[in-house]
Image (cartoon, rainbow, N blue to C red):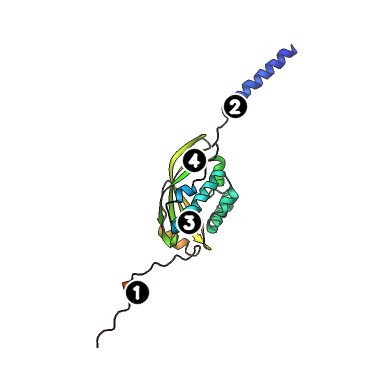
Amino acid sequence: MRNSIAFALSFALIVAASPALAQKKRGPGKPTPAQTSENCKEFAGDQLEACKAVGTYLDLWKLQKWPEVKKLIHPKTIEEIATVNKNLGRERHRMAPWFWAKEDFLLTNWKVASIEDFALGTVVIHTTEQSYRVEEDGFAEDEPNAYLAGKIGGRWMVVDRRSGGGGFDARSIRTMMKDHLDPAPEAKEPEAAQAKEAPAAP
């Protein structure tokens, strides 16, 4: 009788545990290799440096190395994240991937789609990305995103992110970031514009 009761209890525990085992998520899997070198090799100058900054940020994001990720985010943006946290009690900000990785999504792969020079010497890097969706326990493919990179203290950092491929507003950048970026090199005037006019004949 005692053995029968023990068997029944064991069987009940197995049956009760089965749904939990069936619902176990597969997760994002092993991180993909770093993509920065491959994606940035065709660029030069400021575009190359901006690409390397954003690429390193994205590669560290995949690895969930949040302290290193934060070091690549512009100080002004870090201040914005802190303000959001103060107001909402959580870091729900588009440039805080450590917040989204908990319950929403985690970047798993990326590639550069295009790069363009932008306002105040900034550079915009357009990407397509793959991410693991926590709730669905699946992957979203070819998601367009854009990152704004700027230089401060001679170092390129990630300033902002736009999901869905949306663009940045040059006027807003000039207004809000003019005191938070290194001065952009002035464009060289054409030689003809620099030349002094010859004195008029008497």
The C terminus lies in which quarter of the figure?
bottom left
Which numbered disc, 4 or 2, marks the residue closer to the eye?
A: 4
Which numbered disc, 3 or 4, marks the residue closer to the eye?
A: 3
Question: Cα distance, mark 4 to mark 1?
Answer: 52 Å
The N terminus lies in which quarter of the figure?
top right
Sort mark 2 into few (<14), some (14-19) or many (20+) by Cα contacts within 10 Å: few
Question: Cα distance, mark 4 to mark 2?
Answer: 24 Å
Task: Give the left or right position of residue 103, taking residue 47 as reference.
Answer: right
Does residue 89 appear in this view?
no
> Which amino acid, mark 4?
Ser
Identity of the residue drawn at 58% across and 25% down: 19
Measured as percent of width and height from the top left, residue 114 is found at: 40, 50
Marks 4 and 1: CB-CB under 8 Å?
no
Give the structural element (helix, strand or loop) at label 4: strand
Measured as percent of width and height from the top left, residue 187 is found at: 39, 67
In the rendered image, the residue lying farthest to the left is 202
Measured as percent of width and height from the top left, residue 65 is found at: 58, 47
Mark identifier at residue 131: 4
Residue that label 3 marks? 49
Q: Nearer the viewer, residue 25 or 81?
A: 25
Q: Is 22 drawn above or below residue 138 in the view shown?
A: above
Give the structural element (helix, strand or loop) at label 1: helix
> Which amino acid, mark 1?
Gln
Mark 3 or mark 4: whose residue is earlier in sequence = 3
> Which amino acid, mark 2?
Leu
Question: Cα distance, mark 3 to mark 2?
Answer: 47 Å
Question: Cα distance, mark 2 to mark 1?
Answer: 75 Å
Give the structural element (helix, strand or loop) at label 3: helix
